[in-house]
Image: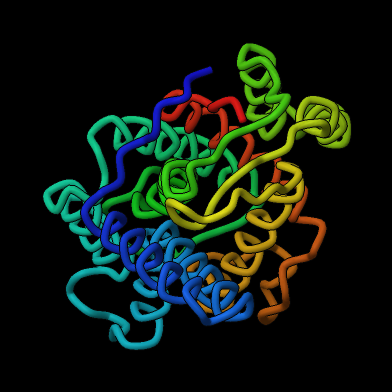
């Protein structure tokens, strides 16, 4: 593992400096409650920034469904692809993401698209049958939804200076991630191994503790890494409910009208997220606490 601090982008540096300056003022006489308020605000700002690509994608999906006219010359799904490409280009041009990070994000983009093509063909979910920019039943903008997960993970690792105690060997995490990804395909033909794979994730990461701090100079906080995984999976489940409510895609049980996505999908999101976690460690190697 390495101990060097991942460099922040200019916006992230400004957030960090603001939080540090406010914490210094709060510490000079504001009391513990004021220091806590500064940390909470900084934590929220950094989390919002880490989610910026996913948040933009969700806003675009909802706006395209509610504001874009049906039957327009440019299909809604094609418009979303062009908008998603513009967002990604802007992130690089404005130095809000590094080219190294972009490489891993694009890998997860491809990983997600391949799974989408297979899953839609198998009837697991479906998209509108419109637009030219698609592979089979999958509009190409959907890969950017998976890329947003990768973007969040690589960003959050540097924003909070994540360090780990008892992080599992990377070779073991890669083996489990490959098995998880394969199971998304093979469970259509073989017994579903998701619960075995979930147990493997808990065994691998169960003893791992994550240390982070809200800004430079702030005290280090601790959290079981599995708890962080569950929290992110829950947010993805909420985003999925927004996406299906907007009609971006539907599951078979929603064909007669929108219903919430079953909470059991949390397991699927947690497992899929492990693939992204492993990819992210090839950009920012896990640092020893």
On screen, residue 82 versus residue 31, left or right, reads left
Q: Is residue 137 visible?
A: no
Front-lying residue, 122 or 140: 140
Residue 96 on image: x %, y % = 24, 51
Front-lying residue, 186 or 112: 112
Residue at the image point whose x is 36% and y is 35% from the top: 6
Q: Is residue 204 visible?
A: yes
Front-lying residue, 207 or 83: 207
Residue at the image point whose x is 75% and y is 68% from the top: 253
Residue at the image point whose x is 54% and y is 51% from the top: 213
Task: Name the quarter where the C terminus is drawn.
Answer: top right
Residue at the image point whose x is 43% and y is 69% from the top: 45
Residue 187 on image: x %, y % = 77, 32
Occupied quadrant, residue 141: bottom left
On screen, residue 244 versus residue 56, left or right, reads right
On screen, residue 234 versus residue 9, left or right, reads right
Residue 147 on image: x %, y % = 41, 46
In the image, is residue 238 above or below residue 271? below
């Amino acid at each position: 593992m390495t101990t060097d601090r991942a460099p922040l982008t200019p916006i992230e540096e400004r957030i960090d400096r603001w939080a540090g300056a406010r914490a210094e003022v709060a510490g000079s006489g504001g009391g513990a409650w004021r220091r806590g308020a500064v940390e909470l605000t900084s934590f929220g700002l950094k989390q919002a920034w880490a989610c910026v690509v996913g948040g933009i994608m969700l806003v675009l999906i909802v706006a395209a469904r509610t504001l874009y006219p049906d039957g327009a010359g440019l299909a809604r799904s094609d418009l979303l692809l062009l908008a998603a490409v513009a967002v990604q280009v802007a992130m690089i041009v404005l130095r809000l993401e590094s080219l190294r990070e972009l490489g891993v994000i694009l890998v997860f983009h491809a990983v997600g698209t391949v799974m989408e093509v297979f899953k839609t063909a198998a009837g697991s979910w479906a998209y509108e049958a419109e637009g030219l920019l698609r592979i089979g039943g999958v509009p190409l903008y959907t890969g950017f939804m998976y890329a947003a997960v990768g973007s969040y993970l690589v960003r959050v690792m540097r924003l909070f200076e994540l360090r780990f105690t008892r992080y599992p060997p990377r070779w073991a995490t890669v083996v489990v991630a490959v098995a998880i990804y394969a199971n998304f395909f093979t469970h259509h033909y073989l017994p579903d191994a998701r619960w075995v794979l979930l147990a493997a994730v808990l065994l691998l990461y169960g003893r791992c503790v994550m240390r982070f701090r809200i800004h430079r100079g702030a005290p280090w906080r601790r959290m079981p890494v599995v708890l962080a995984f569950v929290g992110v999976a829950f947010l993805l489940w909420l985003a999925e409910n927004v996406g299906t409510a907007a009609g971006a895609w539907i599951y078979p049980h929603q064909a007669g009208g929108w219903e919430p996505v079953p909470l059991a999908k949390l397991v699927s999101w947690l497992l899929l997220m492990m693939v992204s976690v492993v990819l992210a460690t090839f950009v920012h190697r896990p640092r020893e606490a």
